[in-house]
Image (tube, rainbow, N blue to C red):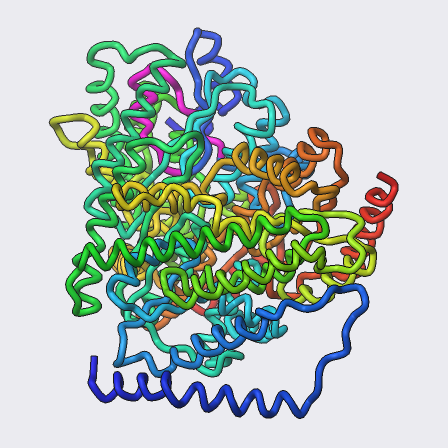
Amino acid sequence: MSPAQLPSRGDYFKQWRGGGGKVCAVFPAQYPKELLWAHGVLPMEVWDPPLAPARAQGHLQPYICSVVRQGLELLLAGGMDEVGAILFPHTCDSLQNLASLVADYLEAPAPNLFFYNPKAPFAAAAKGFYVSQLKALEDDLALIFGPAPEGAMEQALEWSRRLSGLYAQTYARRAAGELGVGGEEFYRLLRAGEYLHPRDYIPLLEAWLNEAPAQGGPRGQGIILSGVLPSPPDLMETLDGLDFRVVHDDLVSMSRRLLYPPPGEGDPLEALAESFLAMPPCSTRGSSLSERLEWLKGLAQSGGAQGVVFSVVKFCEPELFDLPELRRGLKEAGLPSLVLEVDVNQEVGGQAATRLEAFGEMLS
Amino acid sequence: MSLSAKARMQFMKDLGFPAMLSLAKATKGKRGPRKANPDFGPPLKCATRLKEIMTRHYYLSRFAPGARPVAWVTSGAPVELLRAFDFYTIYPENHGALCGAQKMGPELCAAAEEEGYSPDLCSYARVDLGHFFSGKTPAGKLPKPDILFCSNNICQTVVYWYKVLAHRLGIPLLMFDTPFNYGEITEANIAYMKDQILEMIPVLEKASGKAFNMERFLRLAELSKSTSQLWGQCLETMQARPAPMTIFDAFVHLAPVVSLRGLPVARNYYEILLAELTDRVARGIGAITNEKKRLMWDNIAVWYKVRDFSELFAARGMNFVAATYTNAWAETIQHLDMSKPWESLAKTYSLVILNNNLEHRLGLMEKMVREYAVDGLVVHSARSCKPYSLGQYDLKRLLSQRLGIPAVVIEADITDYRFFSEEQALTRLEAFFESLEAA
């Protein structure tokens, strides 16, 4: 199985809808996908739709990030007209206001759902509150899509556990140098999880892991890729082209969400809450700088990375605030870093490639 | 806490500061009064008292370490909790406004940028971090905090910003997580906030070395409530025509309710201010001499332009009589109920404008337009403040459509004037003035 065989988002959406499937568009970042699966709903995540900015500009100031801008562009361009609901997890100020803007001031094409993730440092009350949020979302989903069939939640949790294991295995193999693929292929595969149903995605991921070569791929300097998401698309091609080995990532859309502890047995909502609270540190969840720094150093050590590339979406406050202290701490630990400011709908460009090349030379 | 530090602070409070103030007054007397601008009515007498209060607050703060536990606090945090433990509180946002008004924004922001902080970040945060790195401040010197107290009811930005301070200073960060109200506030949200407050009490006991006393807390919470109510009454006097003060005055007179809420000095101040404003209303004294049009302001002030804007609008007979920003410290205080202190404290702080959905904001602004007889709206799109600014283009459109009043958006920043184009703002304002005068 190769990434080329993966169905595109558009094709998969059509196929799913054609079969009478229910879809919920989901804005970044963290949400309990298991609840949607349990209600027979396919979550389609909206991170960086490749659209030319046009309609959104009339609603957003120029200093709002491209993730928010592109998401609104998709909505205004009719890209969410056929979904059954739109879910807005609480991630940052901009996504918070985007949710309210869509719900209160614009004509949303579908019912809006909201999900508030408690912010760190987590109070002892955070777990109970998270469970209350899960229950509220469950009720909303039941109203829109109908109640979850008996046993559906258990099935959803089982998919979640299997995916947790597969993600952990995928990352561990890459960090150990036993996955001979470049970043472009790696992230194309993992990003398919943003729109494929686990029933289809799990076998694809398993097959890919079985078939992926242990050798090959870039052989150059090992780096950690930190930031929001592996985008714009040519970023990974550029890194591969410069022979960088991305040994691990610390991306909001990827390992910070994918390396979650598998939900345990017992009460499903309690299990999901425990899993959420034990996720890797993330700026959008308010994790402390010490936690983030230790996490990054640990990733670098486990994969033998020599440096860190921060690919930060312009105007992304949660990431930009953490950056100086993380860079300072990494430098003290002997890990140089490079910052690229990107827009998800614009190519990284030649200047960034030159800076990356120089960074690679410095690491060697 | 040390006895010598306490004695030193008491000495400065009783003798040092009054002596300094007398000296300053003597010096000022020699300079003579500032020339009056004919577009304005007589200045508020209270302004002198306000300056004394805030100068005293910042002056004494430098003697607080060792004498009192010191906390740096966000403007929307439930400070009543800290008051109960006798913390000396510093508000970096208020300090940011001060730096902005003194036109120190770019210099301090640049100091933060040299340390790697992006110019795209909130300039209150950059000013504060710039002060932290450079030590520069118009307030003389700020005391290092023992604890940081932050609530995300005004923005998530403060969480990121205070995390940096906590990391650099190696001190605890207390975070009051207030779930955003996409719709009506829920019982689950209130319960979560109440539980957090209860969890904070032992942490504050440890940090301050003082046991929590419910009676004292209720007394201080009541003081805080009456202070905010008095502030609300001060703002309501601007419903009179002519309004006895402008919103630019209110931006300045806001400082005690932000920074000294829960202390007698703040309540006493607003009693005096309210009396003066009520008297001006009774005597028909307006803040500007020829009030022809009444305006509303949305968002934080453009601190480095307060005086210029004040003069620009007054020269055209236009007075700002309402602002969502100044209203924020009065809007929700009615929820504070001493018979249910924790739940009501949670509601009071959760329902503030920036933690509430945009439908709420639209409704609030419609109400204010009617109550204050507003003729036009000026929307400050502040690149520093995303929760205040994202949605404003549609807010302006909807308010104009629903109420038929002219509105204008000006792009600026709260303290960093490198991001303000005067020419562009004036061009937009000229068009706004024309439509307002034609209305």
Which residue is painted at 66% across and 92% down in the image?
Answer: B30
Closest to the observer: A134 or B260?
B260
Q: Taking B393 as reference, is B262 left or right? A: left
Residue B300 in the image: above or below residue A184: below
Q: Quadrant of the N terminus of chain A?
A: top left
Which residue is painted at 44% across and 86% down in the image?
Answer: B18
Residue B13 in the image: above or below residue A309: below
Q: Position of residue B163 (x, y in %)?
A: 36, 61
Which residue is painted at 46% across and 16% down in the image?
Answer: A84
Q: Taking A187 as reference, is B209 left or right? A: left
Which residue sits furthest left? A266
Q: Is residue B255 visible?
A: yes
Tell me which corner region of the image, top left, top right, bottom left or bottom right, holds residue A70: top right
Closest to the observer: A326 or B70?
B70
Q: Position of residue A193 (x, y in %)?
A: 38, 30
Q: Position of residue A31 (x, y in %)?
A: 35, 33
Please give the range of residues in magenta.
A29-46
- Is B187 within the magenta? no
Q: Is residue A169 visible?
A: no
Q: Position of residue B274 (x, y in %)?
A: 54, 58
Residue B79 in the image: above or below residue B134: above
Q: Quadrant of the C terminus of chain A?
A: bottom left
